[in-house]
């Protein structure tokens, strides 16, 4: 077979038709049902496709890193998806939160680090922007690694008004990587952020120290 290269298709929004959106549910987020046809790679069109999409707005993820102590700050909290699966309902994650109207992602990262971990962050370094599960969730996340001082961090934090009960974990970076390998960290943003830090850690330590 001929060798292929990674390139994006020329297909775009104009290659869709007959789109209809119907509200199915509104609660913590909004579940909309989309009906749409799209052009196929051979130029023909699909039949109308019915797809459910859960929409909650954009998100920001931040991984605080202490370059002097070589430690990362993670959190642990109850998650309904793991509970419903019948596995351990408390998951290890990165700090994250929703973007409110008019907010910039960097400001959300600083706010959420304070609310969820009582952690001050600076020197935000952008990891990237991405869909986390585009087949069913509209969530689009901006991810950062940020500088912090991990001394004294820990304990239980979160907003009482949102019934948050968040345990803060200060973990040596190498231990966090081992936890990834053992499957003890099973959330995609944490995997992405820790893997990014593994590649860029030496440069960050030179820059931040």
Image (cartoon, rainbow, N blue to C red):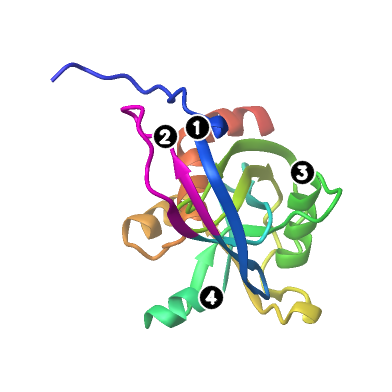
Label 4 residue SS: loop
Q: Local crowd at mark 2 within 10 Å, few (<14), some, or many (≥20)?
A: some
Q: What is the x, y in percent for residue 75?
A: 59, 66
Q: Which residues are magenta?
A: 34-51
> Do callouts 1 and 2 mark residues in contact (Cβ within 8 Å)?
yes
First of labels 3, 1 by sequence position:
1
> Do callouts 2 and 3 mark residues in contact (Cβ within 8 Å)?
no
First of labels 2, 3 by sequence position:
2
Residue displayed at 61% across by 63% down: 22
Nearer to us: label 2 or label 4: 2
First of labels 1, 4 by sequence position:
1
Label 1 residue SS: helix
Q: CA distance from mark 2 to mark 4?
A: 38 Å
Residue displayed at 46% across by 22% down: 10
First of labels 1, 2 by sequence position:
1
Q: CA distance from mark 4 to mark 3?
A: 25 Å
Identify residue for label 2: 39
In this view, the residue in front, 193 or 58, is: 58
Q: What is the x, y in percent for residue 14?
A: 56, 31
> Do callouts 1 and 4 mark residues in contact (Cβ within 8 Å)?
no
Identify residue for label 1: 15
Nearer to us: label 1 or label 4: 1
In this view, the residue in front, 167 or 161, is: 161
Residue displayed at 71% across by 48% down: 148
Identify residue for label 4: 79
Q: CA distance from mark 1 to mark 2?
A: 5 Å
Q: Local crowd at mark 1 within 10 Å, few (<14), some, or many (≥20)?
A: few
Q: Local crowd at mark 4 within 10 Å, few (<14), some, or many (≥20)?
A: few
């Amino acid at each position: 077979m001929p060798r292929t290269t990674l390139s994006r298709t020329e297909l775009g929004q104009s290659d869709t038709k007959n789109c209809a959106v119907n509200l199915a549910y509104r609660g913590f987020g909004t579940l909309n049902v989309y009906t749409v046809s799209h052009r196929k790679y051979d130029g023909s069109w699909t039949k109308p496709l019915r797809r459910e999409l859960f929409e909650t707005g954009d998100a920001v993820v931040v991984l605080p890193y202490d370059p002097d102590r070589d430690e990362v700050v993670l959190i642990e909290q109850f998650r309904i998806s793991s509970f419903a699966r019948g596995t351990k309902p408390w998951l290890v994650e990165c700090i994250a939160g929703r973007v409110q109207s008019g907010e910039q992602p960097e400001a959300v990262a600083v706010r959420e680090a304070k609310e969820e971990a009582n952690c001050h962050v600076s020197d935000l370094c952008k990891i990237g922007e991405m869909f986390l599960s585009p087949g069913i969730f509209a969530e689009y996340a901006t991810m950062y690694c940020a500088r912090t001082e991990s001394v004294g961090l820990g304990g239980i934090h979160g907003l009482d008004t949102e019934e948050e009960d968040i345990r803060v974990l200060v973990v040596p970076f190498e231990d966090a990587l081992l936890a990834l390998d053992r499957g003890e960290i099973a959330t995609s943003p944490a995997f992405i952020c820790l893997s990014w830090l593994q590649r860029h850690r030496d440069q960050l330590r030179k820059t931040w120290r």
